[in-house]
């Protein structure tokens, strides 16, 4: 693959779930920089893994994990030593350089996944006691952690609602209770060859009540998909409030 093949690379990356936009910027002394913009609520680590697998299987390329850096802001990258994108949940990730698996393949251009100031999943925990289950969800924002919890029965449907409820309690903690949320509906639907987590929520503010919805494809863990669907529904609504949060 050469630099002139980048339209095919961009087209392939646009087909990856969670990638909203992709572009290659020419570089005078290198193959160029590939920039990816994620869709609202997309899982940065999951998208990075899908992109890496695509590059391996289709183009014979591999990301050099030893040269990964976390980007806190689009114009101010910060080095993160010994970072591994498959094991952490960073915000945006910039890969300075990619190395080809085969010697005859040129290095992959730099990759940047840019989206600052977004809520990310840190941890989800379940504790079962008798006929009930308590779910705790921890979200991260700008180096701070916010936790929420919810209780329900041990059935699958109730568990999914509890995961959604715990996620919303964590979001409320982020905005210091200035917004309240209720879970209206949670469903795991079959969409073609995939399963998708669908959520419908109600957001209550001092001025209005709104119904929100979000969806996320189930990759490996249904609970993670429910959390991503909730974040997809609320992220844009709470973004204006994040600047008011003191961290």
Image (cartoon, rainbow, N blue to C red):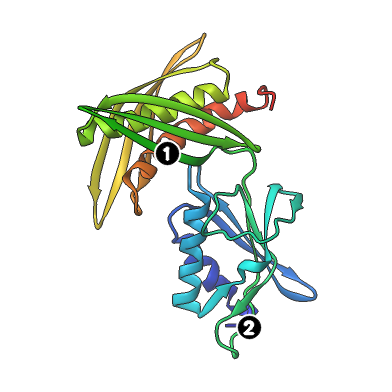
Residue 195 screen position, x and y as percent? 27, 50
Mark seen at residue 155: none
- 98 is higher (above) or lower (below) than 70: below
Q: Nearer the viewer, residue 201 or 78?
A: 78
Residue under pointer 2: 106
The residue labelled by disc 1 is 124
User: Which residue is most to the right?
Assistant: 28
Q: Is residue 230 above or below residue 106?
A: above
Furthest-front residue in view? 130
Q: Secondary structure at mark 2?
A: loop
Residue 143, image x and y in percent? 65, 38
Q: Is residue 192 above or below residue 228?
A: below
Which residue appears at 43% of the width and 30% of the height?
A: 167
- Circle 2 packing at 10 Å, graded few (<14), some (14-19), many (20+), is some
Q: Nearer the viewer, residue 70 or 201?
A: 70
Q: Position of residue 183 (x, y in %)?
A: 34, 24
Q: Position of residue 96 (x, y in %)?
A: 70, 66
Q: Nearer the viewer, residue 101 or 122?
A: 122
Label located before the other in sequence (2 or 1): 2
Q: Residue at point 29% right, 34% down?
A: 160
**Of the two numbered discs 2 and 1 in the rendering, the one whose residue sits closer to the viewer:** 1
Position of 178 with respect to 123 (left or right) is right
Q: Is residue 3 above or below residue 165?
A: below
Q: Residues within 10 Å of mark 1 (few under 14, many from 20)?
A: some
Question: Residue at 52% across / 73% down in the picture?
Answer: 8
């Amino acid at each position: 693959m050469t630099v002139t093949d980048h339209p095919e690379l961009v087209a392939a990356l646009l087909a990856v779930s969670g990638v909203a936009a992709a572009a290659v910027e020419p570089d005078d002394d290198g193959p160029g920089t590939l920039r990816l913009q994620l869709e609202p609520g997309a899982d940065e680590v999951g998208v990075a893994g899908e992109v890496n697998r695509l590059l391996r299987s289709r183009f014979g390329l591999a990301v050099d994990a030893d040269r990964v850096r976390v980007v806190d802001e689009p114009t101010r990258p910060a080095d993160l030593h010994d970072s591994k994108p498959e094991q952490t949940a960073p915000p945006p990730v910039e890969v300075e350089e990619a190395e080809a698996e085969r010697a005859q393949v040129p290095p992959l251009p730099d990759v940047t996944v840019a989206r600052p100031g977004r809520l990310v999943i840190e941890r989800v925990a379940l504790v079962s006691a008798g006929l009930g289950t308590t779910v705790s969800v921890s979200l991260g924002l700008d180096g701070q952690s916010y936790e929420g919890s919810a209780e329900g029965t041990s059935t699958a449907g109730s568990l999914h609602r509890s995961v959604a409820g715990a996620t919303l309690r964590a979001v409320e903690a982020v905005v210091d209770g200035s917004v309240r949320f209720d879970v209206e509906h949670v469903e795991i639907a079959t969409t073609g060859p995939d399963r998708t987590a669908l959520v419908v929520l109600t957001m209550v503010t001092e001025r209005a009540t709104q119904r929100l919805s979000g969806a996320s494809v189930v990759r490996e863990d249904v609970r993670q998909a429910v959390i991503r669907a909730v974040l997809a529904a609320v992220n844009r609504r709470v973004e204006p409030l994040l600047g008011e949060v003191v961290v």
